[in-house]
Image: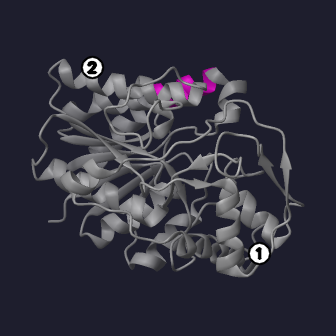
Amino acid sequence: MKERILVTGGTGYIGSHTVVELQNAGYEVVIIDNLSNSSADVVDNIEKVSGIRPAFEKLDCLDFEGLDAMFSKYTGIKAIIHFAASKAVGESVEKPLKYYRNNLVSLINLLELMPKHGVEGIVFSSSCTVYGQPDVLPVTEAAPIKKAESPYGNTKQINEEIIRDTVASGAPINAIMLRYFNPIGAHPSALLGELPNGVPQNLVPYLTQTAIGIREKLSVFGDDYDTPDGSCIRDFINVVDLAKAHVVAINRILQHKQKEKVEVFNIGTGRGLSVLELIKAFETATGVKLNYQIVGRRAGDIVKVWADPTLANEELGWKAETSIEDTVRSAWNWQLKLRERGIQ
């Protein structure tokens, strides 16, 4: 019998890549997603990539009764990977209550139902936003949690606390919280990638949409920061590498290898890359010239952050392996494939 894993938000960008890696590792996957920022045909593409069709239920994690019924229908779920959340920083500032409701209540519902249905563990999709602008770089898991820059970032901090408090109360749950840095790129097959609804909030989809002519030009927010070329620095991680970290975390929970009931790992490359360096890497890797302009700074942007992934490398045996050139090339191939499919 294959062990059964629930992936919430499994038709989303990171979720869909993780489902493929879980299936490749021999797990049986159940996806739930409310399709607010993705589409059901992602399930078809997951099947094309992995050769296995995951079970899919259109369901919102805010629906407690619906979740309860889903656990009863798919018995024996061993662990959950929880991606389902609203995730646009800018929108969270405009609609804080939407973010607090979606991101907090969805987790609370899952944690409440886990003991009832015998679910042992949860891998939580957290973020480097919990560090704010770190005092020391690269940032380790021991860095202090700073006051969040946005309601979105705050929901990640609060959710981490909710998990810790629930486990500390004696709930029979083990948890691993993965704090990701900046996921980019697409599956090498070009069948899965980032497909935001409307205008992209993230840099790379906006970049590839500009390169293909959907957007007129890419704005680089600020070139007067305290960095070598004046643009913000981030730790860009390949989405497939990131997906594999979730499989390793699930293995660790189910094989009872955790050293503590709640563990935290930074998932990044350990290398900081500026926005202008990323643009250059894209132009070099694809041969496509990008129309971009420097504009004023954007509120809430952190100047520079990159991971110290030593703990994940040594404790999980996981490492980011894909080069930035291959990663941006995969994003471009995905954009070209979308055009072939008549999307955008």
Residue that appears at 61% across and 36% down:
302
x and y percentages locating residue 158 in the rendered image: 43, 23
Q: Main secondary structure of the magenta part?
A: helix
Q: Earlier in the sequence, mark 1 or mark 2?
A: 2
Query: Which stretch is magenta?
Result: 97-104
Q: CA distance from mark 1 to mark 2?
A: 47 Å
Residue 151 in which image quadrant: top right
What residue do we see at 27% from left, 25% from top? 164
Image position of 296 with respect to 40: above or below: above
Residue at the limit of the structure toward the right, as seen here: 216
Instruction: Give the percent coordinates (x, y) of residue 227.
Output: 64, 45
Q: Residue at x 51, y 24 (%)?
A: 154
Label of residue 190 in the image: none
Q: Badge 1 is on which residue?
A: 342
Magenta-drawn stretch contains 227: no
Which type of secondary structure does the marked residue at label 2 adopt?
helix
Q: Quadrant of the N terminus?
A: bottom left
Q: Are marks 1 and 2 in contact (CB under 8 Å)?
A: no
Residue 35 visible in the picture: no
Q: Is residue 43 left or right of residue 266?
A: right
Residue 258: name its quadrant.
Answer: top left
Residue 165 tag number = 2
Quarter of the image where one finds residue 31: bottom left
Q: Tell me the quadrant of the picture where the C terminus can be found.
A: bottom right
User: Residue 229, image x and y in percent?
Assistant: 70, 52
Please state the total of marks drawn on the protein image.
2
